[in-house]
Amino acid sequence: MKKLFTLGAAMLSLTFSASAQKMASCCARPAGNLSASATEAFAMLATDKDFSGGHESPLPYKYEGEGRNIEFKTPDGKPGHGFEIKSATPSTKYLFVIHEWWGLNDYIKKEAAAFAQEMPGVNVIAVDLYDGKVATTPDEAGKYMGEVKTERAVAILKGVEMYAGPKAQFASIGWCFGGGWSLQEALLGGKQTVGCVMYYGMPEKDVAKLKMLNSDVLGIFAAQDKWINPEVVGQFKKDMATAGKSLTVESYDADHAFANPSNPKFNQEYAAKAHGQALAYLRGRFKVKA
């Protein structure tokens, strides 16, 4: 994926096999009501040495391109934060970029800027679900990911929606931790949601909630993923069909985080192809030209 810095971490496989049940989620708790088994599963991967050991610390990098740090109000009264690259022309189209387990680091800012450059007329905001914390080691990443509270993450996402405004169109994209939250953002956005891209993130299992989606979903997955495995993806397909919603699945014969340049399982060819698919999808939903 052209310059796709997913940088690590996965969401989870919830309960589709014995091994999946043991793995649980590295996605912080998704929005809405979840079953007890699901909520108990969250953040288990934060302390899973097998999981964290597969993610090398990101190399030092400093983003010096366009964009600015922003602060916005949230429903819980605490300010939310993000990194915004505004369209050169006034626009009500907003892409929310949701980071993986490292947090909103400079790599994610660069990724947000890449989408802004590739989609003129779209405002891009990288949303910070860690409230300013940025990890530089797997231990830190696991700690911060495990500390994310559902209510706070939902408040942040609702806050950035309010920042965009009641007439805005929303689309979201995220990887791993952010992949699951991208889907949750699509649900939170309601009728303002026009698109959702999730890279190997945890699918929503509540069909009643999926029925409330206002857009289709592009899911990009890895066939060798031990966490969001083909069985998990297969169930997601069934659930979306039951909900009467459209899901496009692109599956690559690769391992989890294959689009992450800092991961040993990085596959440059597949990453570039997946990025092209995500970009074409988003351009179509926002109705912007290449």
Image (tube, rainbow, N blue to C red):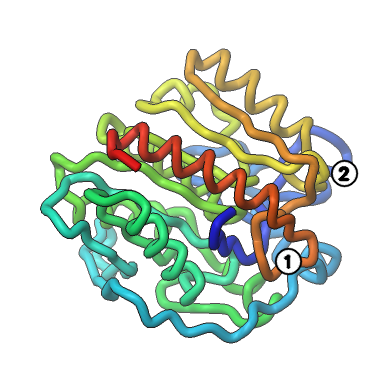
Residue 139, visible in the rendered structure = no
Dot 1 amino acid type? Asn
- Judged from the image, the secondary structure of the residue bearing numbered disc 1 is loop
Who's the residue at 73% across and 55% down the image?
267
Relative vertical location of residue 52 with respect to residue 94 in this rendering, above or below: below
Name the residue that disc number 2 marks: 19
Relative vertical location of residue 179 with respect to residue 268 in this rendering, above or below: above
In screen coordinates, is 92 left or right of 174?
Answer: left
Who's the residue at 20% across and 52% down the image?
164
Residue 2 place in picture, x, y as percent: 55, 57
- Judged from the image, the secondary structure of the residue bearing numbered disc 2 is helix
Q: Nearer the viewer, residue 166 or 270?
A: 270
Quadrant, the C terminus: top left
Residue 263: which disc?
A: 1
Where residue 204 sits, quadrant-wise, is top right
Where residue 156 sits, quadrant-wise, is bottom left
